[in-house]
Image (tube, grey):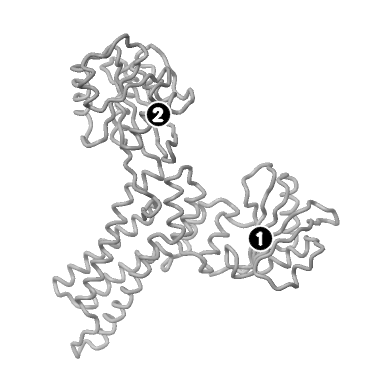
């Protein structure tokens, strides 16, 4: 049910700043503004869609601030309702006083995500687009920004809506057949219905497959930094992050637990995990750290295997690497061999040619040498698609709904193969429609909406 009351909230980040924005939305937005806003321009009586007006806010017969006010008539606003945006100076006192003035004139404070929820309820966007607004706000790199932007512009929801409408048509024809069951007539063309199911199945399958990439983009590509003690793993992490994030020491076993931090390389979000040095130890706590290292490696998409180029032989490196791989389940992980401590070399390391053939990157983490080359290899290993045209699934709720829709489609197909009655097939088709509609909001309930919009910031 669409609420009719008028809401307000600060839309800019908390704290002081040069400018702050206070938003209003609802049927009484203009009258509430008129109670506190003074301007030489007679803005309320003029016909317009959107308007920008200069004036000042009054409260208890005192001028609070000079402001610009953006005025948006329904349906030409973000929410689809009459809306106002007050652009004031960023003093926390000014923001507080303007909110108090509005609340005293019958406006209430908005709940988290309520402006976007009203935009959804008023048909300005579907549910998947509304969720993309939150992802866009949370995006911290080029990749996650582009994925969220594509979804907010329609993304896969337009495709799913079209396919769902066609399936609704066939579902109605199957229901019609039930009314004429005694006459044994067929209104729904089974061959065309099967073609549509295959088309939906192909589209859903493609989206489900893209979730692995989308989830990595959203959470950050996990990169485990592993190797023997004292090869420079923690120094490498600090150098990549340009911060003293990990403790560096010549004492073996200094890093006893995993240390995680994130860094963006050319617009791609990476999550680096510094791990305990891999060795045999009698120290119970260190062994727990090594066990946790292997757990983190299982979660990583890319493994940086760090060696000390100044001391290790090629044969030792191969033995260590093979022994390490024996401890992990996924043998297909991308491994990048990082030969560190080149600053300590007085000549080319033994078996230099073999190391080059294995695409080893030679660096000095201490001197920040060749780190850019390592970054290039990380981007290459990430192997992310071109986001400008790609439709990528990154929302776990959408993934779950599409997975269930896919299972329901397979039930429909089995029903056709088994020649089960049309009423039972219609039930499975309704299951497909339900799960697809759950994504776009054509099927929703207050609990789902509360969960989704409750995660938004107030003012959006």
Q: Is residue 187 left or right of residue 106?
A: left
Residue in the image at 66% along x and 42% along y: 15
Residue in the image at 36% along x and 18% along y: 232
For numbered disc 1, what is the local secondary structure? strand
Residue 121's mark?
none
List the single residue furthest toward the left.
418
Q: Nearer the viewer, mark 2 or mark 1?
A: 2
Closer to the chain start, of discs 2 and 1, is 1
Is the Cβ of the residue at disc 2 closer than 8 Å to that at disc 1?
no
Residue in the image at 81% along x and 56% along y: 59
Residue in the image at 34% along x and 16% along y: 342
Q: CA distance from mark 2 to mark 1?
A: 48 Å
Count of marks placed on residues: 2
User: 451 or 148: which is nearer to us?
Assistant: 148
Measured from the top left, where is residue 79 in percent x and y?
57, 64
Measured from the top left, where is residue 344 in percent x and y?
35, 11
For numbered disc 2, what is the local secondary structure? helix
User: 375 or 120: which is nearer to us?
Assistant: 375
Measured from the top left, where is residue 444 in percent x and y?
43, 65
Callout 2 environment at 10 Å: few (<14), some (14 to 19), or many (20+)?
few
Measured from the top left, where is residue 446 in percent x and y?
48, 63
Q: Classify residue 90 by image quadrant.
A: top right
Q: Is residue 148 left or right of residue 211?
A: right
Q: From the image, tell me which residue sits under label 2.
A: 372
Callout 1 environment at 10 Å: few (<14), some (14 to 19), or many (20+)?
many
Q: Classify residue 302 by image quadrant.
A: top left
Q: From the image, tell me which residue sits under label 1.
A: 24
């Amino acid at each position: 049910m669409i609420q009719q009351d008028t809401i307000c909230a600060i839309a800019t980040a908390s704290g002081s700043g040069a400018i702050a924005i206070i938003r209003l939305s609802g049927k009484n937005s203009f009258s509430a503004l008129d109670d506190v806003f003074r301007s030489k321009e007679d803005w309320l009586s003029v016909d317009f869609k959107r308007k920008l007006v200069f004036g000042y806010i009054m409260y208890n017969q005192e001028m609070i601030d000079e402001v610009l006010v953006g005025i948006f008539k329904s349906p030409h606003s973000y929410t689809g309702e009459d809306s106002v945006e007050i652009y004031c100076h960023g003093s926390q006192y000014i923001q507080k006083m303007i909110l108090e003035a509005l609340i005293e004139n019958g406006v209430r404070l908005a709940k988290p995500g309520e402006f976007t929820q009203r935009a959804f309820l008023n048909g300005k966007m579907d549910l998947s687009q509304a969720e993309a607004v939150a992802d866009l706000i949370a995006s911290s790199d080029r990749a996650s920004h582009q994925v969220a932007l594509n979804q907010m512009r329609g993304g896969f929801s337009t495709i799913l809506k079209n396919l769902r409408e066609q399936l609704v048509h066939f579902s109605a024809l199957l229901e019609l057949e039930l009314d004429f069951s005694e006459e044994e007539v067929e209104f729904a063309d089974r061959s065309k219905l099967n073609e549509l199911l295959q088309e939906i199945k192909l589209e859903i399958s493609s989206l489900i497959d893209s979730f692995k990439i989308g989830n990595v983009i959203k959470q950050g590509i996990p990169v485990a930094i592993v190797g023997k003690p004292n090869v420079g793993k923690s120094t490498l992490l600090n150098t990549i992050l340009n911060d003293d994030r990990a403790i560096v020491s010549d004492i073996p076993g200094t890093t006893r637990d995993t240390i995680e931090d994130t860094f963006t390389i050319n617009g791609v979000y990476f999550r680096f995990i510094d791990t305990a040095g891999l060795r045999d130890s009698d120290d119970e706590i260190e062994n727990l750290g090594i066990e946790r290292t292997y757990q983190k490696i299982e979660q990583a998409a890319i493994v940086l295997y760090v060696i000390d180029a100044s001391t290790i032989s090629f044969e030792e490196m191969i033995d260590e690497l093979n022994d390490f791989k024996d401890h992990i389940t996924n043998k297909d992980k991308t491994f990048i061999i990082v030969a560190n401590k080149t600053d300590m070399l007085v000549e080319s390391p033994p078996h230099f040619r073999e190391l080059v053939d294995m695409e080893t990157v030679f660096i000095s983490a201490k001197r920040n040498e060749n780190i850019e080359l390592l970054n290039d290899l990380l981007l290459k290993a990430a192997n992310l698609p071109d986001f400008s045209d790609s439709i990528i699934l990154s929302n776990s709720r959408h993934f779950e709904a599409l997975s269930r829709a896919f299972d329901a489609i397979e039930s429909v197909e089995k029903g056709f193969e088994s020649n089960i009655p049309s009423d039972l097939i219609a039930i499975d088709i309704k299951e497909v429609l339900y799960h697809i509609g759950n994504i776009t909001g054509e099927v929703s309930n207050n609990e789902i909406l509360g969960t989704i919009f409750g995660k938004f910031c107030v003012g959006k």
